[in-house]
Amino acid sequence: MELIKQIFERNKNWISERLQNDADYFHRLSQGQSPEILYIGCSDSRVTAEDMMGANPGEVFVHRNVANQVVPTDANLNAVVQFAVEYLKVRHIVICGHYGCGGIQAALHPTDMGQLNNWLQGLRDVYRLHADELNAIKDEEKKVDRLVELNVQEQAINIAKMDHVQKAQAKNSGRPQIHGWVLNIRNGKLIDLKLNVNKAFSEIKNIYEIRE
Ligand code: CO
């Protein structure tokens, strides 16, 4: 059967499965959401955000784009972050990359990708910032994997620079907390990079403090 048709069949099965376990399931979902986590990850079809976390509907607010970029002029991302932080009051913000990321590979091997040239420009800056470390890695796969990790680190710092996030952290004793994760697509394992974003960021004055 064609995938599009299959999806509507799968949807019927999903509804009956859910209702079998909990007759009140959809009624409860319709009452609103209060997710604890804002997840920002890659659009890659293999990196299924909720699936790999075993997350249920209502638990994670999700934003995905190519190579999990945090671009300060991205109106979409800004709206997502402000809504998640100010209205949903998420306690955690996760930036999640993945090994084998096509966007990261593209940044290492410049080719003309149209609109993606511009979108992935920030990755070339991540490379430039960490060029000594990256150039010392001879194995191509390991090099791409390391750039995936460093990209997560830099995007996490970009999140920490956002005024919505800084205002919330100033009000709520450091919450939301910022995390950097990588999915190892080769074995499904989720890796916590254990970033200390605040430490990396401490030399830059808090925007919120400047405004006060
Ligand atoms: Co990717």
Image (cartoon, rainbow, N blue to C red):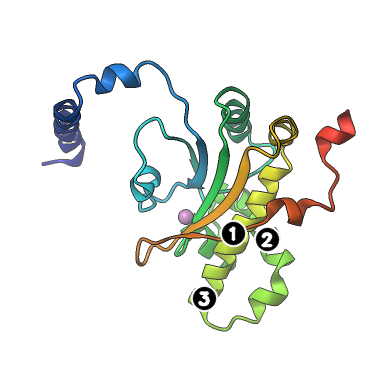
Q: Name the amino acid type tagged 2.
A: Val
- What x and y, as percent, mark residue 151? 61, 58
Position of residue 84 relative to residue 114, above or below, is: above
The number of numbered discs placed on residues in the rendered structure image is 3
The residue under label 1 is 194
Q: Residue at x 57, y 63 (%)?
A: 149
Mark 1–mark 3 CB contact (< 8 Å): no
Position of residue 66 relative to residue 207, above or below, is: below
- What x and y, as percent, mark residue 211? 87, 30
Is disc 3's CB within 8 Å of ligand 1?
no
Mark 2–mark 1 CB contact (< 8 Å): no
Question: Which dot marks residue 142?
Answer: 3
Q: CA distance from mark 2 to mark 1?
A: 19 Å
- What x and y, as percent, mark residue 36? 50, 34
Q: Name the amino acid type tagged 1.
A: Lys
The residue under label 2 is 126
Q: Secondary structure at mark 2?
A: helix
Q: CA distance from mark 3 to mark 2?
A: 16 Å
Q: Name the amino acid type tagged 3.
A: Lys
- Which residue in the rendered view is the most extreme toward the front? 173
